[in-house]
């Protein structure tokens, strides 16, 4: 896994369009440029000036002054949706009806109901839809699953997983806005939940498991009522428990610890492994022995790996990307819904229709 890939370049490349011009759209554009399978040929924004500026920065040939124009572009076969959370459902449905395959930023929707509607639309249109949990496509995540399944840790009893950061309390920012889906659970809480569910499944030979019980506490903003920081305990049928935490207003140790009866594993950089050219590391601790470091190099950038995973599924004629299947996404959203319910976080989309 630490060597450069020797696979031949594909005969053709996936022609991507990007919906949105924010920071994550920029990151994805760079990832596709470094991928083996794709090329960004168009970008759409709510205004032509923004689209042109983004296109110029990234060497993209087509700039569209609306999302509708991008979806009407016949040269684009797949789209990356990088708009704020509340519009993911709308633009996924419109992209599916336009015949485009879709990689949608997380969270895929504001709640499980929206996610179900989105997958129904893509099934009807016969297109591929993946929720963009890019860490699932990195060799480090696969290695972690392999170690759990190998039995080297023994029986898995507990997982601790956190993704949290401290941002300024700017009520005009999407991170702090109820109308824009702000708060930790929807912004980054899906990461620790998805990792915990992944490990719970790996421990019993399944792709994932959903918790049978979710208990949580949280600190909500007094004005916007979004979750500033919160923690939950997930209990699984297997007996494993997971402590997950997230926040947009609290700096925490954003790592994963997996505890077994024989050893425990520290995933130091679970969410952004190898970013900036760093070598990601797993550290294995056995009682009475020196810690064992397991370096995890990848030949390509994290977002390039995500684009390549999507392309492999598409070229195989699949309607599911193994790294993050529709069933996995729906189970994750259901758990996030339960977490929000436990601490009383709601959004306008919870009362409305997509």
Image (cartoon, rainbow, N blue to C red):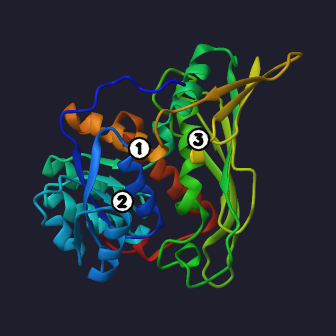
* Looking at the image, residue 82 lies above or below residue 121: below
Q: What element carries label 1?
A: helix
Give me the C-alpha separation between circle 2 and circle 3: 34 Å
Q: What element carries label 3?
A: loop
Badge 3 crowding class, 10 Å Cα cut-off, few under 14, some 14 to 19, many 20 or more, is many
Instruction: Please state the horizontal and vertical placement of residue 212, each as a whole percent of the image.
Output: 56, 40
Mark 2 — residue? Answer: 113
Badge 2 crowding class, 10 Å Cα cut-off, few under 14, some 14 to 19, many 20 or more, is some
Give me the C-alpha separation between circle 2 and circle 1: 30 Å
Mark 3 — residue? Answer: 274
Q: Is mark 2 on a helix, strand or loop?
A: helix
Mark 1 — residue? Answer: 304
Indicate left or right for 292 with 67 as reference.
Answer: right
* Looking at the image, residue 179 lies above or below residue 110: below
Mark 2 vs 1, N-terminal side: 2
Mark 3 vs 1, N-terminal side: 3
């Amino acid at each position: 896994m630490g060597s450069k890939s020797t696979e031949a370049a594909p005969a053709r490349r996936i022609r991507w369009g990007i919906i949105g011009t924010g920071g994550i759209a920029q990151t994805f554009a760079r990832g596709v440029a470094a991928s083996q399978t794709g090329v960004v040929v168009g970008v759409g924004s709510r205004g032509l000036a923004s689209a042109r500026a983004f296109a110029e920065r990234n060497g993209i040939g087509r700039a569209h002054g609306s999302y509708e124009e991008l979806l009407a572009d016949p040269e684009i076969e797949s789209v990356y949706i990088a708009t704020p959370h509340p519009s993911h459902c709308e633009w996924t449905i419109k992209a599916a009806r336009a015949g485009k395959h879709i990689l949608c930023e997380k969270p895929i929707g504001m709640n499980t109901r929206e996610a179900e509607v989105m997958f129904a639309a893509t099934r009807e249109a016969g297109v591929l839809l993946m929720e963009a949990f890019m860490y699932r496509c990195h060799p480090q995540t696969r290695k972690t699953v392999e170690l759990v399944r190998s039995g080297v840790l023994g029986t898995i009893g507990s997982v601790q997983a956190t993704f949290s950061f401290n941002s300024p309390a700017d009520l005009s920012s999407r991170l702090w806005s109820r109308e824009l889906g702000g708060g930790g659970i929807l912004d980054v809480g899906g990461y620790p939940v998805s990792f915990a569910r992944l490990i719970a499944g790996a421990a019993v030979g399944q792709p994932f498991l959903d918790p049978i019980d979710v208990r949580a506490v949280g600190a909500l903003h007094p004005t916007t009522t979004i979750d500033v920081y919160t923690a939950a305990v997930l209990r699984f049928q297997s007996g494993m428990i997971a402590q997950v935490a997230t926040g947009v207003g609290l700096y925490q140790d954003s790592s994963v610890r997996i505890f077994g009866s024989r050893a425990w594993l520290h995933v130091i950089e679970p969410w952004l492994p190898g970013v900036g050219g760093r070598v990601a590391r797993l550290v294995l601790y056995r009682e009475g022995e020196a810690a064992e470091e397991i370096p995890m190099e990848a030949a390509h950038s994290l977002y390039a790996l995500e684009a390549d995973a999507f392309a492999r599924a598409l070229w195989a004629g699949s309607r599911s990307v193994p790294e993050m299947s529709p069933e996995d996404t729906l189970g994750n959203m259901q758990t996030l819904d339960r977490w929000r319910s436990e601490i009383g976080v709601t959004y306008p989309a919870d009362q409305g229709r997509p």
